[in-house]
Image (cartoon, rainbow, N blue to C red):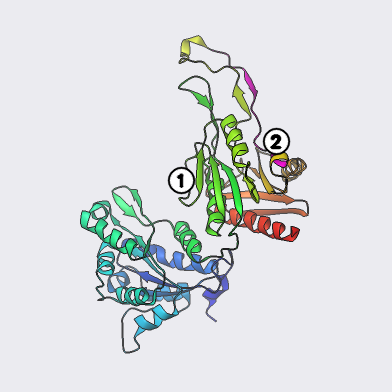
Amino acid sequence: MHPSHDIKGTKGKELEKQKIVLCITGSVAAVKCPELARELMRHGADVRACMTSSATGLITPQLMHWATGKDVVTEITGKIEHIELAQWADLVLVAPATANTLGKMAHAVDDTPVTSVVSVAFGLEKPIVAVPAMHESMYQHKLFQENLVKLRSAGVHVLEPKIEEGKAKLASVEEVVQFVIELLGSRDMEGMRVLVTAGPTVEPIDPIKFITNRSSGKMGVAVARVAASRGAEVALIYGPGTEAPPSNVKVVRVQTTREMCEAFKRELKSPHDIIVSTAAAQDFAIERPAERKLRHSESPILKLVPAPRVLDEVRKLAPNAFVVGFKAEFNVSDEELLAAAREKLDEGLDMVVANDVARPGAGFGSETNDVIIVTSSGSKPIHATKVEIARTIIDVAVARLRGRH
């Protein structure tokens, strides 16, 4: 067995037994494809690569062979590789997808190994994902946008690029993997309802100024995205975070802690199976916010009063739900962090995820987190991306719920 297979499933089993053909075209973003292939494999997928001649001028087929452990298709021969690959695939992933290749796909032009594989996949009704990457002006071209509309109407799933620095940049490796998981992954949460709180809250000082914290909402958005990708009906109560929420969940926008609490109670008028409160809601509010702008010369003294707590009444409102709370501390020892998590668990929660935001790679806005997950059966430290931590939280919650029945 090729050594690359040692990484299979090391980050999850969401794509176990799923076969993906990674079609690489001539964008400079092709340099991300070795890592993309291996990340798909880390989630359990089998990956084979197919490349256009332009792509082979940017990265070598040998590199993709190293990444996947499988022979790479760079030309169509008497072995009819395009037929064999499309028949083998559970999904065809065109990433990066250039304007040229997408135009050919939209008009059934089959003059490269990639477009030939795609055409056969169309005929076999296999799912096809396209991840565009090009200059922004090319992406905004009217006829190119018409091609995207045509491809979408034909059933192609398009993962939008990130518009930045005049470029329509390839979505991140993590975004592409999550997109594929949402299409191919387990739907084991169908019929479940999940409520998530995320982001910071703000408390006004006057009509212009407010107090808040550095929460980005990344953790809660990751939980919402993972649950939705597994088939759950998800509602996300979201403060003013910077992370874009997923499009396939209900989003309830709030500003203050009181607004978050009120939205939380409204959502819990109907039953939910899992509640995950990741929000960094403000502990204090201004007793009497000014109705006009306070000026620097006034040197006002602000009186803080305790803000309501989101989870205070959760057991009365949702007695049968699996409830997950988060606990953020600053510059504490592992023992102190664990003790704080256990104390919060005693408030009637089923799980507490605790972290020290002073630690590198564990603070607000970071892609990773360093947490301790605490339940009644013990504790487990995890250092991973927030998406991976979200998957762990959901895995435990689903398993515990099933164990109750």
Between 10 and 396, which is closer to the camera in this rendering? 396
Using the rendered view, name the quadrant where residue 76 is placed: bottom left
Residue 153 location in percent, x, y? 33, 62
Question: Under tag 2, what secondary structure?
Answer: loop
Residue at (51, 69) in percent of width and height: 41
Specify whether residue 44 is in view.
yes
User: Which quadrant is home to the C terminus?
Assistant: bottom right
Dominant secondary structure (helix, strand or loop) of the stretch shown in magenta: loop
Residue depth check, mark 1 versus mark 2: number of the one nearer the observer: 2
Label located before the other in sequence (1 or 2): 1
Residue 246 location in percent, x, y? 47, 50
Residue at (51, 46) in percent of width and height: 250
**Is residue 313 covered in magenta?**
yes
Report the disc number at residue 312: 2
Q: Could you give the CA–CA distance between mark 1 and mark 2, rounded to whole angstroms? A: 28 Å
Q: Is residue 104 above or below residue 199?
A: below
Using the rendered view, name the quadrant where residue 99 is placed: bottom left
Residue 375 location in percent, x, y? 74, 51
Q: Which residues are magenta?
A: 300-315
Specify whether residue 71 is in view.
no
Looking at the rendered structure, the kind of residue marked 2 is Asp
How many dots with numbers?
2
Looking at the rendered structure, the kind of residue marked 1 is Ala
Residue at (55, 30) in percent of width and height: 256
Mark 1 crowdedness (10 Å alpha carbons): few <14, some 14-19, many ≥20: few
Query: Label 1 belongs to which residue?
Result: 244
Question: Under tag 1, what secondary structure?
Answer: loop
